[in-house]
Image (tube, rainbow, N blue to C red):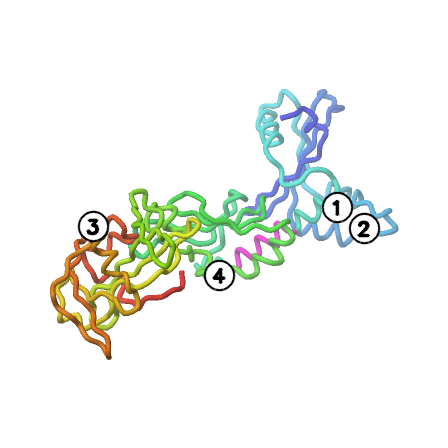
Amino acid sequence: MPEDIYKQDRFYVNLDQDEIIWMYQNPDAVSGDQFVCNRFGVELLREAIRECPIGPDSGFEAYPVYDYIEEHSRQYLTDVGDFLYPLEEEKFRSEPVAVAQGHGTLETLQLLFQAKELIDQFCVEEFGSPADFKDLKKVGLAYTTTEDDKHEIQAYANLIDHQTEVYLDGEIIATQKVESLKQYVENLLPYLDFNELVDIPEWVMDEHLGRGAFREDLQFMQHHAWGNTYDLCFEVSSYMYGGGLAIELYDRTDGDLEPYSNLTVNIDARLSGPDCAFVDTNNFGTAEELIRNNKLGKPTGRIGYSGYCSYPEYRFDMKEIYKYCINPDDIPAIEPKKKERSYER
């Protein structure tokens, strides 16, 4: 750290103790070197601003406010050679929340206490107790686990970098950042919502955990249709009605997965075995070609009917399906989510 920091007024905040610490070095002390430490609360800060309004009478300078604070704060002097001097120097050399006796410092100090009030209000309403402000870069806002209890989700307020950070298993995976602490206090902190803080999009979870479209061993089938070549993979599920095997195809386009077609159709599952399903040859005319080319299964010889359409039944080879499946953990059970197919992704 450059030595010119010793010419600075440096400000620190202990929000747990509602205390502001203003430090500067006095090289002209009798001892030859001295740290001056002014300790005061936010009420004195507000009082000083109220009693010493910054305007024409002060030449729009903030110094009268600081003079008032120094006159009324608890002041401690630590001379070089004192046993506390190394501790004071260590504190002085740490990262301050603000530097210099200026307007910006006054604003930052006030905003930090406003942030504390907003976060405490949220935490008391949500959890019944105030927040812990020991680390201003990591003030806890929310904690939960994934539905399977295998992964931890934590959200923090970073008051130094004015952003909200979301962690998955201790690794930061999302941030919501604004340009200034003022914007953070005015536009984000008043609207904290627990569910929104811990709601991690499924694709973000997949990328972090190396699953779904981000499986390292995921393979894609090349399928030729309508003069184009498509890189296809599966999602395996079960139909809400009947519980039969449902297979949906996705195409990899520019690195993203887009719905391509349904491979299967929902016909009474009581007619089929656990690895069997009727293939949607009505809406996906080349479905059987895809199955044959990639050795995904074999026809059972049975035909299902719906309206004016007929559908061949196939017994699928789940080991082959696994290679191209974005949710392989669902394959053994064949009844993973009990949901209808959705094209929202």
For residue 198, side relative to residue 217 (left or right): right
Comparing labels 4 and 2, the label whose residue is closer to the camera: 4
Question: Which mark is first along the chain, 1 or 3?
Answer: 1
Question: Which mark is first along the chain, 3 or 2?
Answer: 2
The residue positioned 76% from the left and 54% from the top of the image is 50
Magenta-colored span: 111-122
115 in the magenta segment: yes
User: SS class of the residue under badge 2?
Assistant: loop
276 in the magenta segment: no
User: SS class of the residue under badge 3?
Assistant: helix
| Residue type at numbered disc 3 | Glu
Residue at mark 3: 320
**Main secondary structure found in the magenta portion:** helix
Question: Which mark is first along the chain, 4 or 3?
Answer: 4
User: SS class of the residue under badge 1?
Assistant: helix
**Which residue ends up furthest to the bottom in the rendered image?**
307
Residue at mark 4: 193
Which quarter of the figure is the C terminus placed in?
A: bottom left
In front: 141, or 228?
228
Residue at mark 2: 54
User: SS class of the residue under badge 4?
Assistant: loop
Q: Quadrant of residue 77?
A: top right
Residue at mark 1: 103
The residue positioned 57% from the left and 53% from the top of the image is 116
- Classify mark 3: residues with Cα within 10 Å, few (<14), some (14-19) or many (20+): few
- Classify mark 1: residues with Cα within 10 Å, few (<14), some (14-19) or many (20+): some
Disc 4 + disc 1, Cβ < 8 Å: no
Which quarter of the figure is the N terminus placed in?
A: top right
